Amino acid sequence: MTCIIGINCVDGIVLASDQRILRGTEYSDEPKIVEAFQNFLIGASGLTGIRDKFIFEMQLFLNIPRDERISMREFLLGIEDITFKLYERYEKRLHISDSADIGAYHFDALMVYKQFENRATLSHMYSTGFSTNVNKFDVIGHGRPSALPFIKALYHESRTMNEMSKVAAFTLSLLDEAQIDLSVGGDPKIFNLPDNGDARELSKLEINNMVRRSPTLFLEGILNI
């Protein structure tokens, strides 16, 4: 019940998401991207309850007393194990059929972090706790089929974070305003993690300035980037 977009750019990585969450019978807006610690961003998609449990277990893991600061490798292995344990516990309980969209177990995440000092990394972690690096872009969540054509058509490896942030903002705003997918919506939330520098969340004003023009004019502008 979400849409999360990760894009490799010439100067870093863009991680963007919608904010619509279904709890019971009502929708609300909640952030779907969290900064676990400095320069480590996670955007998780899937059943709301599984996402909540993942975030809770991740925070418990981070708060374990240690003699030294947790390393990037230790954290990656730790959240892979958390994801696998959740899968083991709940997959059979929530599984209905291979084709079920609602009620079946589902969880995955896009992660953005500094594996190297001067290079940001984008990874996709699957529901079984296996993660792999993404070289270009990825889209996860219920809104993937609607968002992917825009990202695929407008992506180029020479684009900057600023340029692809506009593409992500337009895509998420279009899904919301045109009600292409009713499970995806709310104001876009966008983070940039540069190869050189720290992660930064774009302000609501910045995002609004990106999408304030009509979709047609905005799309024409993007195509001419």
Image (cartoon, helix red, strand yellow):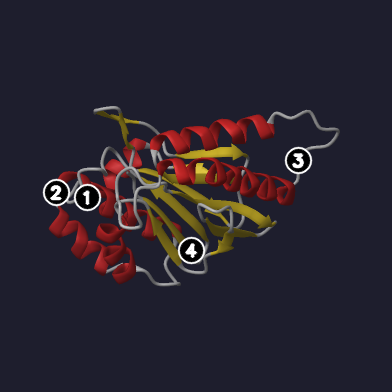
Q: Residues within 10 Å of mark 1 (few under 14, many from 20)?
A: many
Mark 2: secondary structure:
loop
Quadrant position of residue 64 = top right
Q: Residue 158, image x and y in percent?
A: 44, 72
The CA distance from mark 3 to mark 4 is 26 Å
**Upstream in the sequence, badge 2 or badge 3?**
3
Residue 28: image tag: none
Q: Residue 156, image x and y in percent?
A: 39, 72
What residue type is disc 1 on? Leu
Quadrant position of residue 148 = bottom left
The CA distance from mark 3 to mark 1 is 38 Å
Q: Which residue is mark 4?
A: 8
What residue type is disc 2 on? Ala
**Upstream in the sequence, badge 2 or badge 4?**
4
Q: Which residue is mark 3?
A: 70
Q: Residue 201, image x and y in percent?
A: 46, 41
CB-based contact (under 8 Å), mark 2 and mark 1: yes
